[in-house]
Amino acid sequence: MLKKIPFKNILIIGFILIGYIVLLKLTGMTCLIKSTFGVSCPGCGMTRACFSALTFNFKQAFYYHPLWIIMIPSIVLLFYLWIKDKKRLFKLTIGIIIILFIIVYIIRLIFGDQQVVYIDFTKGYIYDLFQNIKNLFK
């Protein structure tokens, strides 16, 4: 049987996620990974895509992230597999979702307009930090 997550742990995870969202809002960051490293992650645009879909702007939702449409079915399927103790199918589903995200990420990096998904290390805090350290020794 898949390990059941205690309710206390679910609450802790929930508070961490809420804290993360509050941190992003207070600092004006849209994504911790993108702000820190200057590199979009495979899930970049998913939140904006889901909000666009909620307002029935499906064209914009697909623009922000084409996999927004699998979010609810995936969550329901994973929850069902977890409850029914289908370990192998649960892991296979997670693997398929990860592979889909990686494939879409690579396609978006190569063929995208670089507005949502990009790699630009100069836009990250790490780059700024190294530039400031380098300037100290000039």
Image (cartoon, grey):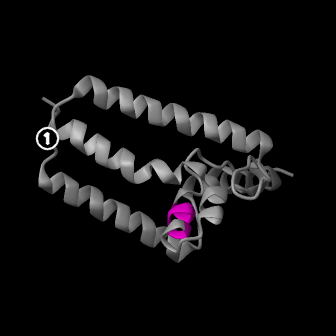
Which residue occupies 27% across, 23% down?
88
**Circle 1 Cα neighbour tier, 10 Å, few/some/many (<14 / 14–19 / ≥20):** few
**At which x and y percent is residue 114?**
78, 53
User: As rendered, which of 69 and 135 lies closer to the eye?
Assistant: 69
The answer to whether residue 76 is visible is yes
Residue beneath disc 1: 4
Q: Amino acid at mark 1?
A: Lys
Q: Is residue 15 above or below residue 136?
A: below
Q: Is residue 12 above or below residue 80?
A: below
User: As rendered, which of 136 and 11 lies closer to the eye?
Assistant: 11
Chief SS of the magenta region: helix
SS at badge 1: loop
The answer to whether residue 35 is visible is no
Q: Is residue 99 above or below residue 49?
A: above
Q: How many marks?
A: 1
**Which quarter shows the N terminus?**
top left
**At which x and y percent is residue 7?**
13, 54
Taking the image as shown, residue 74 lies to the left or right of residue 130, namely left
**At which x and y percent is residue 120?**
77, 49
In the rendered image, residue 43 lying in the magenta stretch gets the answer no
Taking the image as shown, residue 51 lies to the left or right of residue 92, namely right
Q: Which residues are magenta?
A: 47-52
**At which x and y percent is residue 52?**
56, 69
Which residue occupies 63% across, 58% down?
64
**The furthest residue to the top:** 88
